[in-house]
Each structure stands twice: as structure tokens, then as C-alpha cells.
Image (tube, helix red, strand yellow):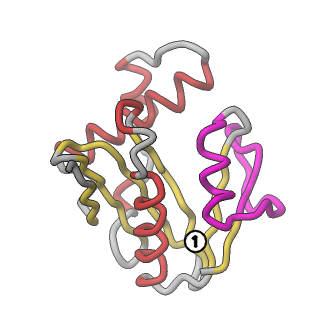
Amino acid sequence: MTEWTLAPEAVDTDDAYALRRAYYGDVAGSYWKRAATEAEIDEGLAGDEAERLVPPTGQFVVGRYGGEPAACGGVLMLDAERAELTRVFVRPAFRGRKGAGLLMDLLEHEARALGAGRMVLNTRLDLVQARPLYLRHGYAEIPAYCSGPYMEIWYGKDL
């Protein structure tokens, strides 16, 4: 039986970088209602501050299914008690195989290890697969804690 393995990984490994590119292409393409170009993905990743996803400011996680890079996500410490869930992504070919739940569990564990007692996140209303995942994992809608052009709904959960 094929299994998931998930573990912290540097954002600049080949697999992590490829997953970050796939994530950006997926969410940007969904927003634009067309495939993102390589140049647009490059531009989106430039200055995205992914380098902060290392202890003590954060953590990045890669999930592999049968050894193949299939999922990623990160947590970023916002202050001494809150972490933000970010870049949660499962490649489309691997969705429906329970990897998203395992990824969420590990990301919450990593946030607690960094000292967080609360996890928050922001997302868009059109990301219809992500929002039910957050609700299934105990997140509830909260008032906005930040603002930006791609933020339409905010969630939080005590860890």
C-alpha cells in the first residue's frame, strides 16, 4: 500500500521549490481563471518571504506519496503566541488520498513546537476545496487579522 510521509524541509530544496511553484500556479490560475505562466509564477515567488519558514520564525513541510513530492505547507509565527497557516497545497493528482489531513496535523504540531497556542489563516472564497478542509480541522471564521488583495475570509483555531 502506498503511504504518505511528511517532514519539515527547507524551502529551497528541489522538491520544496517545485511544490511552491505548483502551489502558486494553482492558486494564481484559480484566481485568474487561466493557467499562470512561468514568468508570472517567477514574479509571484520573488520576494514571497518563504525564507522565513524556518525555526524560530516558521517551518515548511513537504509531503510525499509513495516517495513522490505531492504536498506542502508552512507555518509562520506572527507573534509569540500566533502562527499563520500558509501555502497549504496538495497536487491535484494526489487529492482525495487523505494527505491534506495529515499535512494539517503536522503543521499544527510544528506550530505548537514553535510556541504557538493559536493558528490563524486567510484565504479566498473561490478556494472551495481548502475552506471545508479548515472547517473539518476545527477552524472557525474570525475577524480579519490582516488585509490584502487576495484575502476574503479568515479562520482561527486554538492549538
The percent position of residue 15, horizontal first and vertical second, equals 21, 44
Closer to us: 105 or 142: 105
**Magenta segment: does it hold 140?**
yes
Closer to us: 83 or 155: 155
Closer to us: 23 or 106: 106
Tag count in the figure? 1
Q: Residue at x 74, y 56 (%)?
A: 154
Q: Is residue 49 above or below residue 34?
A: below
Q: Residue at x 43, y 77 (%)?
A: 109
Q: Residue at x 42, y 29 (%)?
A: 43
The percent position of residue 133, horizontal first and vertical second, equals 60, 52
Q: Residue furthest right?
A: 143
Range of residues picked out in magenta:
127-155
**Which quadrant of the view contains residue 117?**
bottom right
The percent position of residue 105, horizontal first and vertical second, equals 46, 68
Q: Is residue 120 above or below residue 71?
A: below
Q: Amino acid at mark 1?
A: Leu
Determine which residue is flagged by label 1.
78
The percent position of residue 78, horizontal first and vertical second, equals 58, 71
**Magenta segment: does it hold 1?**
no
Q: Is residue 1 above or below residue 127?
A: below
- Give the crowd class for mark 1: few <14, some 14-19, many >=20 residues within 10 Å: some
Quadrant, the C terminus: bottom right
